[in-house]
Amino acid sequence: MGKSKTTGQSFIKGAIIISMGGFISKMLGALYRIPLTNILGGEGMGIYQMVYPLYCILLTVSASGIPTGIARLVSSGRGYGAEKQAFYLYGAIGFIGTCLMYMLSAPLAAVQGEPAIALCCKLLCPSVFFVSVLSIVRGYFQGKGNMYPTAVTEVSEQVIKVAFGVALSYIFRENLALAVASTLLAVTVSEVLATGFAALWYLRRKSKKPLYTPAYVPVSSILKYTVPLTLTAIAMPVSQLAESIIAVRLLREFSSEATALYGVFSGCAVTIINLPVSVTYGLAASSVPQISPLAERGDFAAAKKKAFKSLLITLAVSVPAAVGLFLFAPLATRLIFGSLAPAEQQILITLIRIMAVNAVTESLVQTSSACLTSLGHPIKSTVTQWTTAILRVALTAALIKFTSLSINGAAWAANCAYLVATLMNFWYILRVNSKGSGKRDENNVDRIGRFGRRLNVAGKGGVG
């Protein structure tokens, strides 16, 4: 596999670096819940989780599509200044998101009937801006084939969050509202410090100056890739919100523990399943700078060959992980969620075993979506995500309502949805550069990017 001209990192080395960073980060996040649950208790964790839906939606809009979109532009060789244009564009969007979360803090607290949420939102809202900036820097370095900044900042922000979160929540443990708010302040502190570190890395970068200064990539080109990726990413939180409402309401018809059942599914089983998926994120990120230049030159045969190599490696990593999850589900449950009641632990073990296959399909969807973006077809992964999100919610409702599966129905629905998503993305990759397909997709992303041209600074070359 080829090496990046910028850093000398091979595809495998880059994938290992970013995968280890993602895995360590996810593991720290999972372990973080153990002391946090002991300190805050069920009520405190409930308040903690109630703040996140609004935060995740704003974060998705302001930051989710940036890393892969910027990486694609930078690695293509035609994205000069993409990261600088993105600083203006998404910095402004992130700032608006921060202000919006601050203004919605009181109304959200009133609607949810929990006064403590107002303070929590106010302390968490600066993170929206800083994550936007951090994502731009990560995308820039990923496009250059350098995965160290992403891995290092992911681990560092998690370490800072865990250290500050546990310390502050313990200090204010006598006041539940302050204890919960302090854990969210720790999130903001971690993002500020990680962004500062990434900014220093960016400012100290060594890059060759061109013989002449080319025109900066227009904002429309940035939006052409980041908007579809954002639309792709937002499908998940929207479907999860719909799923939580529908599943809990339907479960209440059969059980008085509906909220607890859904909590075991979404808060515990999904957390464990996502651990191996985070490892394969590196393969998705590392595939972008490998595939984009080939696609940009029109060599789709070679680009698709690299895409399928990435998918085969993803398969080789995720299949043993899925087998391990199935076999060691009881051990994982005792180690990570040992505080659950015995009955809940048994439910969790069953859910993990049902969803173990998702370690494979989610990983493949993740890598194939990155490959489609690298091949210049981000709209296709958007179609996949929304199609399967709707399918998942519909299947969850049907399986809980009309069968005796109870919460296991949500697990089987997730399995079906991710299998369909995998097959759709594979089909799209196979059809890349087939007659008419590329042109239709290019026209679609061009329509999305048209309004971005109005944001460009007057004159050729944009911002100087």
Image: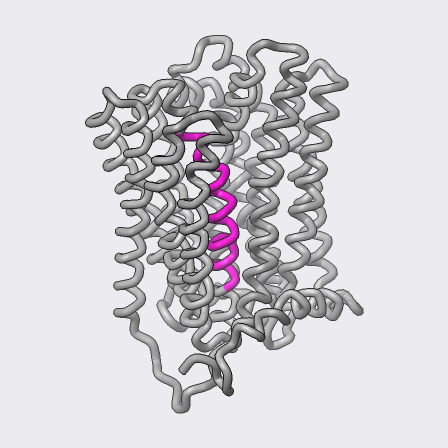
Rendered location of residue 154, percent (x, y): 35, 48
Task: Give the left or right position of residue 459, taking residue 441 as reference.
Answer: left
Q: Could you tell me residue 263's position as x and y percent?
A: 51, 22
Q: Which residue is drawn at 47% across and 35% down?
A: 108
The x, y position of residue 368, in whole percent, is: 60, 52
Q: Residue furthest right?
A: 435
Image spot of residue 23 (x, y percent)? 40, 41
Residue at 52%, 52% in the rendered image: 61
Is residue 152 placed above or below 226 in the rendered structure? above
Res 144 visible: no
In the figure, 95 relative to 253: above or below? below
Q: Is residue 4 above or below residue 372?
A: below
Q: Where's the C terminus, which quadrant? A: bottom left
Q: Residue furthest left?
A: 171
Q: Is residue 300 left or right of residue 153?
A: right
Residue 231 visible in rendering: yes
Q: Does the magenta stretch include residue 349?
A: no
Q: Give the range drawn in magenta.
A: 48-69
Q: Which residue is painted at 60% across and 51% down in the image? A: 232
Q: Main secondary structure of the magenta part?
A: helix
Q: Residue furthest bottom?
A: 212
Q: Residue 118 sits in which quadrant?
A: top left
Give the quarter of the image for residue 434.
Answer: bottom right
In-front residue for pair 115/81: 115
Q: Can you tell which quarter of the image residue 371 is in?
A: bottom right
In the rendered structure, does residue 55 fall within the stretch colored magenta?
yes
How many numbered discs, if any?
Answer: 0
Q: Which residue is drawn at 75% across and 67% down?
A: 440
Q: Which colour scheme is used?
A: one colour
